[in-house]
Image (cartoon, grey):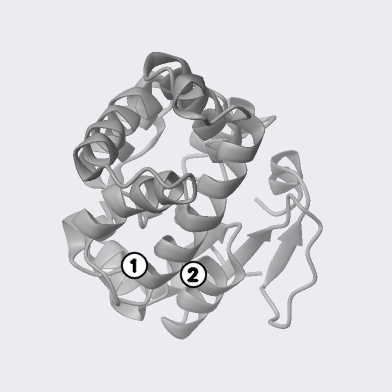
Amino acid sequence: MPFYKHIFFDLDHTLWDFETNSELTLKALYHEYELDSRNISSFTEFHGFYKVHNHRLWDKYSKGLIKQDELRWKRMWHTLLDYKIGDEKLAKEMSARYLTILPDQKALFEHTVEILSYLKNKNYQLHIISNGFEEVQHNKLQKAGIKKYFTQIITSEGSNYTKPQKEIFEFAIKMAGALLKECIMIGDNPEADIQGAMNAGMDTVFVNHINADISINPTHTIYHLKELENIF
């Protein structure tokens, strides 16, 4: 059995419940900017459009096709364009507000705090590898009360690499002062987290919250975080 010392976690969609927190943030913006008065009568529809654009642009960002700033505001811009609102100033203002409000949300997946405490008590070194923005991810961890569990917090912004590039994993291992054989990556995204870590030679745990079918073979697959107790 491998002897792990360092456990690397993805943050969004793995520990921090991005979908819940993003929806709460967008709902706050919907009311703050009185979007119902701009012929955006359904928040559910607005939220759906935003998710489509956000997913598409994050995919482009992960592949190095667009820059961080473009991702930050164009997801809102394209959502407003769906309603024929061509207001770049509004899109940029709402995008800035989104990134201000989002880290204040605190929804975590079930058993997150419990499992982080369990692993810490067993003397594992815990770290984050995230494609998110540096300040935003640090704030999320702080506000959700889990930053104290992590030694290194590696972001794409801070490392100049994005998952699934193997370089971000190699950078993270170096920052942790670890050996490859001592490391394992835990995440929800088959391509970014699992295939990326495998490309760097790391063992992996696929957190399959949504019971997805995948074509790659992680070292372990779990369906909720409590199952990590069966591995570590």
Cβ atoms under marks 2 and 1 closer than 8 Å: no
* Marker disc for residue 26: none
**Is residue 144 among the parts visible in the rendering?**
no
Disc 2 is placed on an element classified as: helix
* Of 143 and 184, the residue lying toward us: 143
Q: Position of residue 7 (x, y in %)?
A: 47, 54
Q: Residues within 10 Å of mark 1 (few under 14, many from 20)?
A: some
User: Which residue appears at 56% of the width and 31% of the height?
Assistant: 23
Residue hosting label 2? 192
Q: Quadrant of the N terminus?
A: bottom right
User: Which residue appears at 38% of the width and 54% of the height?
Assistant: 130
Q: Position of residue 17 (x, y in %)?
A: 57, 36
Observer-side mark, 2 or 1, equals 1
Q: Amino acid at mark 2?
A: Ala
Specify which label sits upstream in the sequence, 2 or 1.
1
* Marker disc for residue 61: 1
Q: Is residue 141 left or right of residue 31?
A: left
